[in-house]
Amino acid sequence: MLLRRITEHVKAQNWTAVALDFVIVVVGVFIGIQVANWNGDRLAQSRENAILAQLEEEFLEIQTAIDSQIGFRRQYIESLGALIEVLESKDDVADEAIVKVGLENATTTGRWPPQSSAYLQLMANGELATLSSEKLQKLLVRYDARRERDAHLIPELLRLVIAELSLNAGTDRAITINPNMGAAIDENVPADYHPGDLIRSFNLEQLRQYEQRYEAMYILHGTLELAEIRQLEIVKQILELLTTETNL
């Protein structure tokens, strides 16, 4: 209809009307583009808000997991350190509870902190750069790099744990290891379990031949604790920034 009216005005050489029609067309196109842009921005902001909310939820869970793991890690370090002191003392008699707890904690690697599925999805889709906060982008990449950088420590510790479970002739454990099925706990473990109950008995003199293994475990757990502390620092920075972003 507008095109027909413009044609009529041109035929009538009504240039004022033609100019007015042209202005109407330009303004209409401009408004249409602005509305489309506004809708696009609104949808993009809505999607980013959903991503930020998911990131915040996941990194709160990661923070809790790392906090908890650091607590366990310190127990492993303390008990292994006490076990090493007993073995180094060369005494024929040792505190049974100290040795049993140390031997039990020599069979665990702890858990490696999880990764954020929202971050992995952003990376997979190439959408990380769509986040409006460049600082947040860098922190997310930094956490991932820090986590991957230290990931080799768990397999190293696992190798020592497997050797401890399968090659320690000086310990009778309530844990058995099967190459096909993994580790299993004996059904006779007391219901009111206490740390050290997974060790039935041990031969102190035979244990001394494995002292280097326990020292290597002690060092790896200490290295892992430092790695987890550094990861936790980055996670806290991410959460602080996410809290700011989601409250804007």
Image (tube, rainbow, N blue to C red):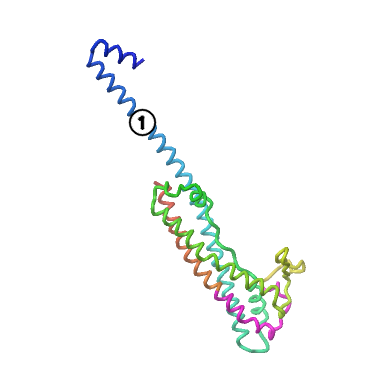
Q: Residues within 10 Å of mark 1 (few under 14, many from 20)?
A: few
- Residue depicted at 59% across the width and 63% down the height: 111
The type of residue carrying mark 1 is Ile
Q: Is residue 201 magenta?
A: yes
Q: Position of residue 84 (x, y in %)?
A: 60, 81
Q: Is residue 96 magenta?
A: no
Indicate the quadrant where residue 70 lies: bottom right
Q: Position of residue 163 (x, y in %)?
A: 66, 74
29 lies left or right of 226? left
Q: Is residue 199 above or below residue 184?
A: below
- Residue depicted at 75% across the width and 68% down the height: 186
Where are the magenta residues, as a range?
A: 196-219
Give the secondary structure at mark 1: helix
Indicate the quadrant where residue 12 lies: top left
Main secondary structure of the magenta stretch: helix
Q: Which residue is mark 1?
A: 33
Where the N terminus falls, by quadrant?
top left
Can residue 111 be seen at all in this image of the molecule? yes
Near-viewer residue (31 or 70):
31
Q: Is residue 172 above or below residue 16?
A: below
Which residue lies most toward the top here? 12
Q: Position of residue 26 (x, y in %)?
A: 30, 25
